[in-house]
Image (cartoon, rainbow, N blue to C red):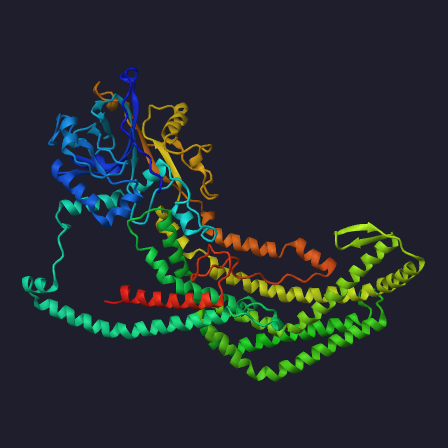
Amino acid sequence: MSSTRVRSAPVPPKRFKHARHVCRIFWPECGTNLPSGYLIGWHISNFVCCIAGIIPNCSLAKLESSVRILVKDADCSDFWQYCNGPPSVLGSWNANPEDEHGHLEVLSPDVRRQSIPNLSSSPNHTTDFWVSIRSTDSNDDRSSSHSRPYLSDINCSSTPYPTSAQFIFYTRPKPGSYLSYRPFTFDFALLSDEEIKGTTVPLSDMDYTMRQINSSAQLLQKIQALLNGSRVPRRSISESFARDKFPAKHFDSLKAAMLSVLRCVVQPLHWILLLSRIVAEILLFALDWQLPVVFGGSTIKHRTAFGQQLHKRLTEVCRWPFMWLKTRRKWRNDAYAAANFISFWSSFWQVLADVVCGIALTVCMRVFLVQFLVVFHQAGHFLHLDVMRANIVWLMGLPAGLKLNHNLNHCFGSMVLFGIDFWDAITSVVTVWEPAVLWLISFAGILGASMVLSLCSDILSVVTIHVDFVYTTFAKLYSIEIKALSSLWKLFRGKKKNILRQRIDSCQFDVDQLMVGTILFSLIFFLLPTIATYFLFFSYVRFLVTFTKAGLWFFLFFFNYFPFCAMIIYAFDRGRLPGGIRFDVLQSEISNADIRKINRQISSPMIPSPRSPHSRMSPVEQQPRLTRVKSASEAFSPVLLRRTPEMSSCTYLKLRNSEIALSTLFFSYRSELARVFQHYSPRRIAKSLAFGYPYPEPPALVKHQTSYRWNSDDASSPTDHKQRSLRLQSIVDFWLFMKVYLTP
């Protein structure tokens, strides 16, 4: 938006006086059915214009005066900047071709140029452009499907040009819908606000044309409001003068009384919301608190699944007021507005579905409390007796005919059985607290089903902590043995690992070193089957526990990333999710061989080439564009085009959105599932089994979680003092939001 291009009216050389140019006109599809009037829109380039609409039953002077008032309105400055300049009166529309002038005030170009003042000092705007467009049918036949506009004449800088016209029909998008030749993307996590706005990439004429088409309905509303006199600028008057001049009526006092009662009701609600926000900030501070080094040195939200889920939900809810403010720009129909709309409502619907399912799960747990306790005891009995104790006793014998080291096998088996008995004694003491634990889990269901699932995952981690301890011990022993065997094997070959240069070097060993290495190699090699057997067994037990956690994790991903809102929008309002644009040919006399040529003629001056310096686009914008031309089923009779010899040759195209692929809606869901499958890749699991590496834990719920309290562009983490100041600032902003938007 910052770069502006000067558009000067073309002055053709003498040798081009009789050359034919192509005038491309973006025409609203409903404009053909309107009566005669003046055309209002934007002059994009030399022979390209976008018609926003037709203003009938209005004089030229009144329309130009309304445009001047609208251009000078300070509230519309952002709107004009968004559309690359203010609009202007571009020409006339004659709906009755039998009438030479209709009811319009047809002026010569010189007189018209003198009568139209400079509407804006922007170099993007010019008034030296006028087109005269007529209908191919009379007023009685304009409702037929064969009625089309044609270009009667065009004047640029007081010079008439012989041109061929290309009318590109478009349907005005509904509020919230928009046209875009860039397919919509759901990759919000990888795009900043500036990249979604498109300000980091130089915008082409096609971008501004799409913006002007999307803003045509808002422009007509503003013009009609001015013409109807409903929006006349006036100077502000004082309250005392207004009270004397406009005395209060009976319903005004009643309205004031109702407002006072409503304020009394809303005021306690403000304090409740503010208190809730303060509690949320305290919880977020506790979840971000750094644990001591003894407990791992990480934060609470990174150590527990419940902490991650609670932090995610609190962050989303705290962002809702500011996300809602971004959706209030109803005059802006583009990818940025659609991204804000979908981001807000996706978060809302995810939380709503989560809470509804959580309440249903809470009711089920309260009703079937005894059955849940029975299932919990059966699961513990299966893990401790059927899986661990029975198999440990089996391993202490001759497992599968393997003759393990008797002394080491008996030592390992006795230690593991003692650990199981010790853990059973601890769990039997806390058995009386099982109903309270289930009640706590069911109470967490009020906050959502994801909270119940995350609590179940944490409780499963606590209950199976002895399995993790035994598995980690045997994995460490197995890893040490593998590394020792590898080092001794290098010793026999006269090699040694250089840890400084990370390579294998040759080394000379004496007889004593080789003798000690041989003894150690034999000892470790004969003890390896016993340690490997216990390691593989507890890897299997750990896999069962991790598989159960992964199942809970998949349900959490469903509640956090399933596109509920996107599915609803895709079913009922697909205009918010464009998959690109396409051009349908509405003229049957054009052959298929000319379709590609027409497409190049339309898109070549509008879209920069990939080699141009203005084509540096983000990865999302470098997707294959769906701008194409294909033959349409609607046919236009060529006889109507050749009815009079004065008519210029016209080509009629239809601009419409392409549907977005259904798989695009599940972008976030698929990306998170791909991250989980990559985390549990077969190569990583096989490597952990072969070399004794730690088994992969369930991944984090959020890979790149950015906080709403500080700028995400800052790579450095904020200090504690900065976090406290930003939290205080967020509370103040929330209080101002309530006073401004939630006060009647």
Q: Is residue 533 above or below residue 55?
A: below
Residue 632 shows up from this direction:
no
- Left or right, 190 with reference to 568: right
How many discs appear? 0
Q: Which is nearer the eye, 296 or 347?
A: 296
Q: Quadrant of residue 83?
A: top left
> Is 402 situated left or right of 418 in this image?
right
Q: Is residue 536 left or right of residue 135?
A: right
Q: Position of residue 151 (x, y in %)?
A: 23, 26
Q: What's the residue at 43%, 70% (across, down)?
A: 281
Quadrant assignment for the N terminus: top left
Give the percent coordinates (x, y) of residue 264.
23, 75
Residue ID at (64%, 73%): 465
Quadrant housing residue 352 = bottom left
Name the foreground residue: 43 vs 431: 43
Could you say where residue 87 lies in the image, as x and y percent from the top left? 23, 39
Q: Is residue 570 above or below residue 693?
A: above
Q: Is residue 449 left or right of residue 504?
A: left
604 or 510, which lies in front? 510
Residue furthest to the right in view is 511
Can residue 625 be seen from the camera position used here?
yes
User: In terms of image quadrants, where is residue 69?
Assistant: top left
Taking 649 as reference, is 212 above or below it?
Answer: below
Q: Quadrant of the C terminus?
A: bottom left
Residue 291 appears at what percent x and percent y? 56, 71
Tell me: residue 259, above or below residue 596: below
